[in-house]
Amino acid sequence: MPQSPLMTSSPSPLALVPFVSVEHMMKIVNTIGLQQVIRDIAGYIEADFKRWHSFDKRERVAAHSTEGVIELMPTSDGETYGFKYVNGHPANMARGFQTVTAFGLLARVETGYPILLSEMTLLTALRTAATSALAAKYLAPKGAKTMAMIGNGAQCEFQALAFAEILGIKKVRLFDIDHKATEKARYNLSMRGLEVIACPSAGEAIAGAEIITTCTADKQYATILSDNMVGCGVHINAIGGDCPGKTEIHKDILHRSSIFVEYTAQTRIEGEIQQLDAAHPVTELWQVFTGEAEGRASVDQITLFDSVGFATEDFSALRYLYDQLERTGHYTELDLLADPDDPRDLFGMLHRASNSPFYQGKITA
């Protein structure tokens, strides 16, 4: 058979990329156990935050529209590169679609070759919950047993179970303007050994709670928590405000709180602190995790984690997932990269695959 002058008999590098589908992700989580996965991801996130200066950090790249936002979240530690594609479309709920969907990738910096492609709708819920509970481990009142969940959508159960696993929360008080969402969450959580109370208002849900989580979906300046609702000594886990023009916490609460963020430059644009002057002091989580800054300093202090989600958390979650592939076997391999025998002969690879007479030996010189 006539051969291309660039063909070589040397073996080509492996180009198949492990892919974790939604089905694979569910199998991995159910094999290991949901709460154990959350605990494990929290450990990876904490370890990566403690090497904060190793990462290339930047605000996420966002394409905003009146309907929502589509974002890319990239980072690298110099050896491995990762990114997540994620959307946030509040109106999707009425269409029967998810408000947030995502997928992500890891690649080796040395070659640029991907080593993992994965769904991240489920994985984002897991890493968001893990990050929330990890922050609360440093910021929440000691011995906290009750959490209020304001907003009972797709994130609700993950958040509650993360706090149960990492902080030992026993009671969850629920409120959502959609009573069906509350009933859904109440049913799901009651099967997990938690005491679950559905409340008729946000104020009643907050009563007696040491930890308050806000997680609403509407893309607007909102007041989920007003100043008179929040007393001293609580921890606020504010995870719903995550883009410009979207907040949940009244400005006066922010002024009374010690505020902790993931990456200040991004949170100034997207978080609750977009309501504040740019000079208002905040503390980044990595500083608390490494002991460079103090977390909760007093019993009466209001601590507020202004969480918008950051690329290193997705990197950590993908890194954890990659480490589970051999253990669980729940993945498939994608022929994602063109990989000719000779890297210079991409054209020849294409024509050999087309059954061209030339490459089948039917045309001779």
Image (tube, rainbow, N blue to C red):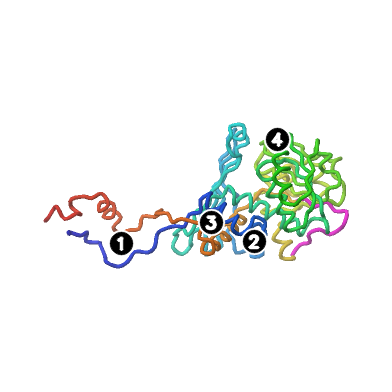
Q: Residue furthest front?
A: 191
Q: Which residue is mark 4?
A: 180
Of residues 40 and 300, the one drawn nearer to the viewer in this rendering:
40
Which residue type does callout 1 highlight?
Answer: Asp
Quarter of the image containing the C terminus? bottom left
Do the CB atoms of the residues marked 4 and 3 lie less than 8 Å apart?
no
Q: Which residue is mark 3?
A: 82
Compared across the picture, whether 152 is left or right of 253 comes to left
Which residue type does callout 2 highlight?
Answer: Asp
First along the sequence among labels 4 and 3 = 3
Q: Residue at x 71, y 41 (%)?
A: 152
First along the sequence among labels 1 and 4 = 4
Label 4 and label 2: CA atoms lie apart by 31 Å
- Tell me where residue 43 sits by quadrant: bottom right
In percent of width and height, residue 9 lies at 27, 66
Which residue type does callout 3 highlight?
Answer: Gly
Label 3 and label 2: CA atoms lie apart by 19 Å
Label 1 and label 3: CA atoms lie apart by 27 Å
Q: Which residue is mark 1?
A: 341
In percent of width and height, residue 205 lies at 81, 42
For the stretch drawn in magenta, what is the main secondary structure?
loop
